Image: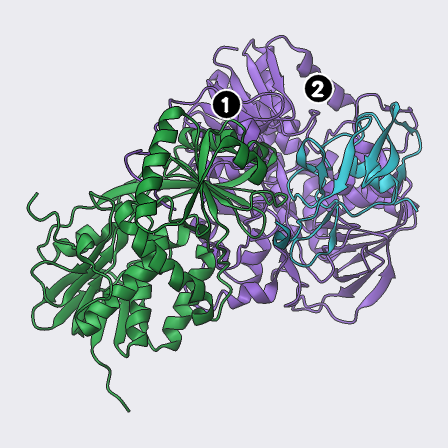
């Protein structure tokens, strides 16, 4: 199920394929990662550190960091500001337990 | 570029200031955290997207096109996707980002850093699918998207109407709009506004008409009290407010998206960090830099305009941009000052009309206040047992505000809910660089720094 | 009911003052702490939490090892998870000169009883692939680690309250008389006691001067930065052969980066301002040692005051010329060695002698210079 859809009359750019937690998804050139995930019914961008609860897109303007995801080769990235690109590998951000060091 | 005016923020205020300066032959460097100029109000679709003439997107295109034309000017240097992380010295701006890192010596610095959403915590507000009014407008204007399921819009202030009308017009299934302030409190300011800012009043009425047309229920004097759902929002509780503004008799509404607009606060950390005198002005959204008629702060050569210097919206921002530009050029423009004073009067009246006589709250002890550290209200209260507690103390005791948001998600609501109100500026912990998080490798790329003064190597590492 | 042994007034609510007080309270003394601001808000509260032995001066090594013994049990004593982890740590060298310095230092520390392993580049790559492959040599010590100053402070405060200690915050000292008894005139009134402990950190010189004693104290304005939480990669504490870097990843995944790079401020102006260019040098150095740090956002930097004696060793013992006045202050690495120094000082106050000698730290050692 999708959580967001294009407004009538809006046409996106060229389609590109990217990966989210290993799953192949279609985005559009220039589209924000958070927007692309929402279109695919994915609201969760990170897992919170203490409660291990899902969090997602909130302020949408780069202030709150709730939509932060992990991108291979970049690190933690705000999904509201970072556009998808062909082949981009996006992962749900979670802090893994220190016991595993 | 030699000695440009440096403008931080490419929203309406920054663009307006840049346009006036460029038209007079003054070189300008414009920096913005976003990849595209426009700010929140003139947010643009990604390059490569197209909007049909009849696209159901409520947005201004004419003024946006005109303002964004400055990006093609030869005298403009634009650094998008760039974070300004410090004003390290008078007339100096430090920036960093994947597109470059460095310092710019400025003839004048103009802070046009925009607003931030004021958090309104209640049980369930951290669930995915609960988004801010600004965030939902950015989805529509910046991504061409609307939420797919049922939408409830709740809040206090003009932004609630803007968000709800934009979503409804764009085809979203907005079922309810929940405004905390009874309409009668706002009506008087709107009537006065007919002379002070008729265009703004017309806009507001237009938004209400849009909601009517789309069959959206508008409830004033109500507040959202809880969001339900497992892993994502599924339903919302709302309640009317009693005379003491406590919610009672909740009603449950189904919703896949909840949009929150409980007010805006100026994003003024650059001003605070550079030592501007801050004054508390509730009609402007809280602590704002003290400014002259030419928008200059108490730090000479440092100007602050737009929502980042006091919440006022796009018309105020555009005028303040021009006023700052005139001041930098050493000019007076009395008609412009006059227009500004009129609309400034309306802004203050409208802001006060929406203010509730006691702070709104729907948070209980279990409500998460600090999203970064998952801190609940009861944990913060436990750190407040001494009477001289301030936010800096709560911060070190609980890690409040120590996450990536640097306190932007939590300090406002913590101050309000803990009654350690910001009656003086020290109530907020000190603002130090980096005023926004910066990637370490981007900071390390800064080659304009002074020579290294290594700690005394005869001695072991100090400070552990 | 047993009467208290004596009443001790402690000036200073940092780790030295509060742990001395706690040790004294545990030994049956009545204690009163006077703090000019809030307790645990200066160096003890804002340091980066390293518990290192490899970065200590040679005379401090045995005291650091003794402190580790106390640190290991401190959480239990305080009934609090103080986020204490003895992770082990690397001290690294990146130039030929640094390797020489590291080797000399390690030889001395080994003779002082420290168990160190010498590591060649190949060993480092195998054990710690997150370290840069430009590192020429390292030593490993299993005892290095860290604890959270933010957790220790409130826990010590609570333990003191439970032990019946009195804490006066925002209490300014106006004058001190120390004869047979102690009489301290403060903004909160006159307080009499049998003994006095000066544990005023960077302000120790000012307090001692009220008794006519000169204790030379230099002021460092140390800066620390912290990153957002990252994937758990850096399992060990990292220090530098030249003492210009400390680095660790704490239990929430954040990396703390310090090393004594200097900010701006004086005791009079309380500025504690960042000299951010020097922070960038500090961060760049960290990045050269641990390249993976580059992907993390720096979220906060801050500065704090640290008082340092001329030889960087603590002042701990009797104040010269005053039989009932003691000092515990001004050590580099005060957070690490605080537990053992304060335990010894409490022993000295109550029993008149100590298990380990405090002579190297005699507050009178610079008197004739």
Q: Quadrant of residue B37?
A: top right
C365 left or right of B159 in image: left
Element at label 2: helix
x, y percent for residue B217: 87, 55
Q: Quick check: can you spot residue B203?
A: no
Which chain contains the residue that carries disc 2? B
Count of numbered circles in the view = 2
A2 left or right of C269 in image: right
Chain coloured cyan? A
Q: Quadrant of residue C279?
A: top left
**Colour in which chain C is shown?**
green
Q: Quick check: can you spot residue B205?
A: yes
Which residue in the structure is indicated by mark 1? B446
* Residue reaching furthest to the bottom: C1
Classify B323 as above or below C78: above
Instruction: Name which residue lies at 67% across and 50% down.
Output: A96
- Looking at the picture, the colour scheme in use is by chain
Disc ID at residue B165: none
Which residue in the structure is indicated by mark 2? B68
Chain coloured purple? B
Mark 2 residue crowding within 10 angstroms, few (<14) / some (14–19) / many (20+): many
- Nearer the observer, B430 or C254: C254
- Nearer the observer, B384 or C22: C22
């Amino acid at each position: 199920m999708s959580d967001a859809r294009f407004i009538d009359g809006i046409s996106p750019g060229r389609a590109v394929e990217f990966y989210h937690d290993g799953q192949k998804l279609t985005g559009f050139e220039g589209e924000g990662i958070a927007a692309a995930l929402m279109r695919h019914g994915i609201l969760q961008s990170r897992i919170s550190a203490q409660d291990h609860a899902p969090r997602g897109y909130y302020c949408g303007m780069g202030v709150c960091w709730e939509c932060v995801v992990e991108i291979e080769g970049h690190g933690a990235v705000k999904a509201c500001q970072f556009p998808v690109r062909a082949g981009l590998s996006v992962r749900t951000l979670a802090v893994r337990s220190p016991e595993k060091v | 570029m030699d000695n440009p005016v440096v403008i931080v923020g490419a929203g309406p205020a920054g663009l307006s200031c840049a346009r006036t300066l460029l038209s007079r032959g003054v070189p300008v460097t414009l920096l913005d955290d976003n990849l595209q100029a426009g700010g929140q109000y003139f947010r643009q679709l990604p390059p490569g997207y197209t909007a049909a003439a009849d696209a159901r997107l409520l947005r201004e295109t004419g003024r946006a096109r005109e303002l964004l034309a400055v990006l093609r000017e030869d005298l403009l240097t634009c650094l998008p996707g760039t974070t300004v992380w410090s004003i390290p010295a008078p007339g100096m701006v430090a920036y960093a980002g994947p597109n470059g890192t460095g310092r710019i010596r400025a003839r004048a610095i103009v802070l046009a850093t925009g607003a931030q959403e004021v958090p309104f915590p209640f049980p369930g507000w951290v669930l995915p699918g609960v988004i801010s009014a600004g965030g939902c407008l950015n989805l529509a204007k910046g991504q061409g998207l609307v939420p797919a399921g049922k939408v409830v819009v709740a809040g206090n202030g003009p932004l609630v109407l803007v968000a709800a009308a934009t979503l409804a017009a764009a085809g979203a299934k907005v079922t309810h709009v929940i405004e905390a302030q009874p309409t009668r409190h706002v009506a008087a300011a709107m009537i006065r506004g007919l002379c002070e800012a008729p265009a703004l009043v017309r806009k507001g009425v237009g938004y209400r008409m849009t909601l009517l047309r789309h069959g959206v229920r508008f409830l004033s004097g109500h507040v959202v009290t809880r969001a339900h759902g497992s892993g994502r929002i599924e339903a919302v509780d709302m309640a009317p407010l009693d005379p003491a503004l406590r919610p009672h008799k909740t009603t449950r509404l189904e919703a896949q998206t909840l949009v929150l607009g409980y007010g805006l606060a100026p994003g003024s950390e650059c001003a605070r960090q550079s030592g501007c005198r801050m004054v508390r002005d509730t009609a402007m959204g809280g602590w704002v830099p003290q400014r002259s008629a030419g928008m200059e702060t108490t730090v000479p050569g440092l100007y602050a305009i737009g929502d980042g210097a006091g919440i006022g919206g796009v018309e105020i921002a555009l005028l303040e941009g021009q006023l700052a530009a005139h001041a930098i050029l050493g000019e007076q423009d009395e008609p412009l000052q006059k227009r500004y004073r009129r609309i400034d009067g309306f802004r203050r009246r409208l802001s006060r009309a929406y203010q509730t006589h006691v702070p709104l709250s729907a948070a209980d002890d279990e409500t998460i206040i600090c999203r970064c550290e998952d801190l609940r209200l009861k944990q913060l209260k436990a750190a407040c047992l001494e009477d001289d507690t301030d936010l800096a103390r709560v911060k070190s005791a609980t890690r409040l505000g120590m996450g990536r948001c640097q306190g932007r998600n939590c300090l406002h609501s913590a101050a309000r809910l803990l009654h350690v109100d910001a009656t003086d500026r020290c109530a907020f912990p000190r603002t130090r660089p980096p005023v926004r998080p910066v990637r370490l490798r981007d900071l390390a790329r800064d080659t304009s720094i002074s020579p290294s003064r290594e700690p005394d190597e005869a001695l072991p590492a100090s400070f552990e | 009911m047993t009467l208290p042994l004596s009443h001790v007034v402690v000036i200073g609510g940092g780790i030295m003052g509060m742990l001395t007080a706690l040790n004294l309270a545990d030994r049956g003394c009545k204690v009163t702490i006077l703090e000019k601001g809030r307790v645990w808000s200066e160096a003890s509260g804002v340091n980066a939490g390293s518990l290192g032995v490899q970065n200590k001066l040679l005379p401090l090594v045995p005291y650091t090892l003794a402190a580790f013994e106390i640190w290991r049990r401190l959480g239990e004593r305080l009934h609090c998870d103080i986020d204490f982890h003895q992770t082990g740590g690397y001290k690294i060298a990146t130039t030929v000169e640094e390797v020489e310095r590291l080797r000399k230092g390690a030889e001395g520390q080994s003779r002082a009883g420290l168990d160190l392993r010498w590591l060649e580049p190949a060993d480092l790559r195998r054990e710690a692939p997150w370290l840069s492959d430009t590192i020429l040599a390292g030593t490993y010590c299993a005892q290095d680690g860290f604890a959270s100053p933010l957790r220790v402070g409130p826990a010590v405060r609570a333990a003191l309250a439970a032990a019946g200690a009195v804490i006066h915050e925002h209490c300014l000292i106006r004058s001190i008389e120390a004869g047979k008894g102690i009489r301290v005139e403060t903004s909160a009134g006159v307080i009499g006691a049998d003994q006095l402990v000066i544990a005023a950190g960077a302000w120790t010189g000012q307090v001692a001067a009220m008794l006519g004693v000169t204790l030379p104290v230099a002021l460092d304005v140390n800066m620390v930065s912290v990153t957002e939480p990252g994937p758990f990669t850096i399992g060990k504490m990292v220090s530098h052969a030249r003492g210009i870097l400390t680095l660790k990843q704490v239990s929430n995944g954040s990396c703390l980066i310090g090393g004594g790079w200097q900010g701006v401020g004086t005791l009079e102006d309380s500025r504690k301002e960042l000299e951010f260019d020097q922070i960038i040098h500090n961060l760049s150095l960290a990045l050269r040692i641990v390249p993976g740090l580059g992907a993390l956002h720096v979220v906060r930097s801050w500065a704090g005051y640290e008082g340092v004696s001329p030889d960087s060793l603590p002042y701990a013992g009797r104040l010269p010329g005053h039989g009932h006045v003691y000092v515990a202050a001004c050590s580099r690495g005060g957070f690490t060695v605080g537990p053992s120094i304060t335990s010894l000082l409490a022993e000295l106050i109550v029993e008149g002698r100590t298990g380990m000698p405090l002579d190297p730290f005699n507050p009178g050692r610079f008197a004739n210079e």
